[in-house]
Image (cartoon, coloured by chain):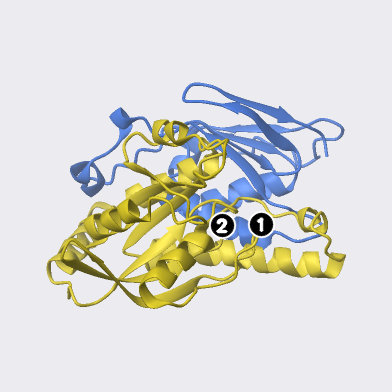
Chain colours: A yellow, B blue
Amino acid sequence: MGLFAELRDSISRVSASLFADDSEPKRIGIYGPPNAGKTTLANRIARDWTGDAVGPESHIPHETRRARRKENVEINRDGKTVNIDIVDTPGVTTKVDYSEFLEHDMEKDEAVRRSREATEGVAEAMHWLREDVDGVIYVLDSTEDPFTQVNTMLIGIIESRDLPVLILANKTDLEESNIQRVSNAFPQHETIPLSALEGENMDEVYEKIAEYFG
Amino acid sequence: MPETTSDDGPGDGVQIDLISAERMSGKTSMEKIRMILDGVRDGKIVVLEAGLTPDEESKLIEVTMSEINPDGFSGIEIESFPQSETSDTGLLGRLMGKQSTSKLTVVGPANQIQSLHKDETLISALVSRK
């Protein structure tokens, strides 16, 4: 991108932040690889503050195949109120093979349909990231190696757009959880441990949401 | 400029295209993405001397997803070194049109390339025939 286009973008970004209406909810995208627990977290936040869920959870990868938005989630922390729209996004990957779904007792037609929807969902998630989110909660499964290309690329994309990002090391209820490994992978960011499934350490998560996105 | 790759196909072997930073420098984002995906869909391993910008990486994922089909192309495997903090361009650098892309990047068909090990200084991958 040339000098003037970059300059124009920077000016519009600065002026947008200067004149932003604080009463408008910020759109916070929940991103991460498949099966990191994004929907479980989105549901936990939505249930805690609105009483509703965002979408169905599953151990099958790519259960979330469309970005889902829960609007006007008002989080109160230490006298501070943060109004956000939660956008639960499909897990980002660079490959989708329908045969992986066959391992989950699906017929071929269903597996093909699901893989097609999954690819559309990932493309949609990337589009949201470039155009439509004001901040990111990046969810990682702390029992898995965080040092993957998809994670590196996505954090790089988020940083390049100057979006505030909160990294969550999820699934701390599992024995193999390794929070330090997640911290080491992204030392430039703070890592918050949690179990979205069990609701462990959600107080700190809400404090950080208020701090990062308020 | 003459094409450096053969259209005869890799035969029994695996073709590797090493693409210089110079060759990519004059291309638009979509031209770069098209060049990478055309090569990968032909079963080639594409090695970029200078990688893509974060924005181009995001578009590469998006375009890759739109081209996946159940009976043929299942996507890409991509590996590159993370950006070092010293190569990070600040606001001034970006205003001057600088992009920190100097990172070796390897892209291949998902069903032919498998990452074995990766850290800040080493990427080890297993490449198989189709």
Quarter of the image where one finds residue B100:
top left
Residue A117 locus on image (x, y percent): 67, 69
As shown in the figure, which amino acid type bears the numbered disc 1? Pro
Residue A191 shows which numbered tag?
none
Q: Is residue A75 above or below residue A139?
A: below
Same subunit, tags 1 and 2:
yes
Quarter of the image where one finds residue A209:
bottom left
Q: Is residue B62 above or below residue B84?
A: below
Q: Is residue B80 left or right of residue B67?
A: left
Pointer 1 chain: A
Q: Is residue A163 visible?
A: no
Mark 2: few, some, or many residues within 10 Å (few <14, many ≥20)?
A: many
* Residue drawn where x is 34% and y is 54% of the image: A205
The quarter in which the C terminus of chain A is drawn is bottom left
Q: What residue is pinned by disc 2?
A: A91
Q: Is residue A102 above or below residue A142?
A: below
As shown in the figure, which amino acid type bears the numbered disc 2? Gly
Q: Earlier in the sequence, mark 1 or mark 2?
A: 1
Pointer 2 chain: A
Disc 1 to disc 2: CB gap under 8 Å: yes
Residue A13 locus on image (x, y percent): 22, 62
Q: Is residue A154 left or right of residue B4?
A: left
Residue A3 locus on image (x, y percent): 24, 52
Residue A61 shows which numbered tag?
1
Q: Is residue A195 left or right of residue A201?
A: right
Q: Is residue B84 visible?
A: yes
As drawn, which residue projects farthest toward the left?
A18
Residue B89 locus on image (x, y percent): 27, 39
* Residue drawn where x is 64% and y is 62% of the image: A58
Element under disc 2: loop
* Residue drawn where x is 53% and y is 67% of the image: A124
